[in-house]
Amino acid sequence: MSLYHETASLLLNESSVTHGGSLKSRVFGTDSKKLFKSPPAQVYALALESSKWSSILKEVIENSELLKNERKVTPALAVLLVHDHLLAKGGIALPTSHGLRAAIERHKARLASEFTKARLRRKCPTVEALREEIVEKLAGPVHPRWVRVNSVKSTLDKQLETTFKGFQVVSSVGEVMSAGRNKRVICLDGHVPNLIACPPGLTEYLTKSDAYKKGEIILQDKASCFPAYLLDARPEDGDIIDACSAPGNKTTHLAGILAERGLSKKSPQVKIHAFEKDKNRAKTLEKMVSRAGSDTFTTIHPGEDFLRSDPHSPEFAKVTALLLDPSCSGSGIVGRDDTPELHLPDPSAKPSAISSNTSRRKRKRPEKEEAVKEPAATFIDDDDNETVLSSQKDLQTRIEALAAFQLLIILHAFAFPAAKRVTYSTCSIYAGENEHVVLKALSSPIAKQRGWRILRREEQVRGMHEWEVRGDKDACELNQEVADGCIRAFRDDGRGVMGFFVAAFVRDGSLDGEAVDEDGPYRRDDEGRIVRDDDGIPTLKSTGRKAVEGEMEEVEVDVRYGKKAKKGKKKKKGKNEEVEDDEGPFLRDEQGRIVRDGNGMPTLKSTGETVVIEESGSEDGWGGFDD
Ligand SMILES: C[S@@+](CC[C@H](N)C(=O)[O-])C[C@H]1O[C@@H](n2cnc3c(N)ncnc32)[C@H](O)[C@@H]1O
């Protein structure tokens, strides 16, 4: 197969192996050497560039009537071949005698003239100007690049005098977004202290700056700064746990806040415990913490599962605050889709009907190929891999499984004896991972027993109190106080943030039955170890049952944490609905045990894939960005 056939097949998603995910992951994925005879880098470049130009190429091909005269050339092949014919330095990468090349070159005069007309219709004097217009259009709405000044190493004033010297300071993020991608303008954020918005075109300038290399500034989306700020920790309060830490944006933000509030770097009064289950990601975390200068007061727990930590260990006796930022669907993350839409020419289009691509936008039915490309939902996992889910049911199953894990993380945090404040955050847009999880956590036995409640909006630190986008009241079952306590962020709403969710839980300790029970709420064996089931779920002293059994039933993933339901018997789900599949969404072996991968993650029946996914890397390998 030629480079052109292979690339066409990739763009049309014809291979089940390359189906789904970003263009990059489909081309450079683990099996790429087996999949392509042509060099994968060449396939990727041709697919990407041709897709970018495809709205114009479609117009040129239709107006030149190429497809009517060359029946062997398919619409996708035409886009690729005409792209190279008109725009690639060496033209079509096939011998002159090759049938496909000849089929295009037979029409070179007509193609050249239609290309010129298409360019002039867009008022572009040169092909270069047309290229710039395409790049600008594809880049979509401007999303600012957010820069957090790391208070462990620097101050806002120092950065304004150095990294941002000579920059124009404007008063709103809207002005930054409309200033142009490369303009030297900044806005000092009004919600999160020490945060600066810049146009996205300055990213390279920033990552090459001394301040960045020395860890004085960290690139982190504004919404991703909410959790550490909302936790509102002070050095006099006690130790902090960051339960899910890599790459370390929030861990280092916590450190910056403590430093600004008087933590002594030489003899720190408190420490941050940073858990990271994945050993490789823990290395990135270690690098980031060290570069940010907070290693003297951060204890990294590499490869340690927070859920397996013992809340009653003396090591955690002084932990008063926990930041929980567990794996999620990543559905709120900005700008990681690298696949521009492919516009395919219609072989039966009449040239006279076409004046510009905008005149054809109101097409009623999508073309077959485009319909194939339209996903029901895309999940971005923590390693930046995308999974395209093809049905609503798959999406629902994934969210339920993630929500069950997220709830478990919160309930475990609630058990730390000295804990008074917990934040829970996701970069997900789904209520199932956000408000619903918060409600379930609030109604759990452990929350009631220990007096955990939502941190009300009016109690929140100023910037978070003033942030106007709050939780969804319907998703909070009309509980206004909980909805107002929840903080949301939506991408592309003009505020320049990614999709995000955060809420905080607090307790005053007066309901703390554990003050007199030093062993905590879990059953222990003779050696003092917490009694757990096969899934690692601790058993409560008070009920003799698993700590989260009740909650799991509500989210339909009880099979993962609770007892196996009896076959054939219908079980209640929610208030009135019944579920048919008593065994839940996970695959089981002949003994009825959930089939898990090496990390202990269960396998979904619907997709055959495991549920909880690895974590997102960073754009430069040490975690300077977002999440
Ligand atoms: C969304 S990312 C965290 C991003 C990070 N808070 C930041 O701001 O840079 C979730 C991380 O939690 C880790 N993780 C997931 N489950 C965990 C667990 N049970 N214990 C510890 N770490 C866990 C993942 O490996 C991943 O690195």
Image (cartoon, rainbow, N blue to C red):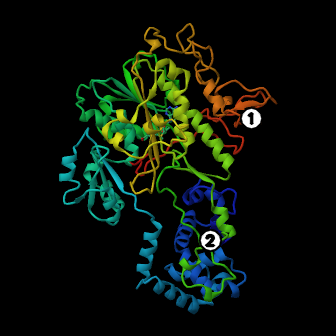
- Asked if residue 46 is positioned above or below residue 438 in the image, the reply reads below
Q: Of marks 1 and 2, which one's residue comes earlier in the chain?
A: 2
Q: Give the side of residue 545 with respect to residue 572, left or right.
A: left
Neighbour class for label 2 at 10 Å: few (<14), some, many (≥20)? some
- Say whether marks 1 and 2 touch (CB < 8 Å): no
Dividing the picture into quarters, in which one does residue 131 lie?
bottom left
Which numbered marker is on residue 605? Answer: none
For label 2, the residue is 3
> Residue 152: x, y in percent?
26, 38
Rendered residue at 31%/39% (across/down): 462
Rendered residue at 58%/67% (across/down): 43
Viewer-side residue, 557 vs 339 = 557
Q: Identity of the amino acid at label 1?
A: Glu
Q: Give the side of residue 268 with respect to residue 541, left or right.
A: left
Quarter of the figure that contains the N terminus: bottom right
> Residue 408: x, y in percent?
55, 29
Rendered residue at 55%/45% (across/down): 430
> Residue 130: x, y in percent?
44, 79
Q: Which element carries disc 1, helix, strand or loop?
A: strand
Rendered residue at 29%/29% (across/down): 234
For label 1, the residue is 578
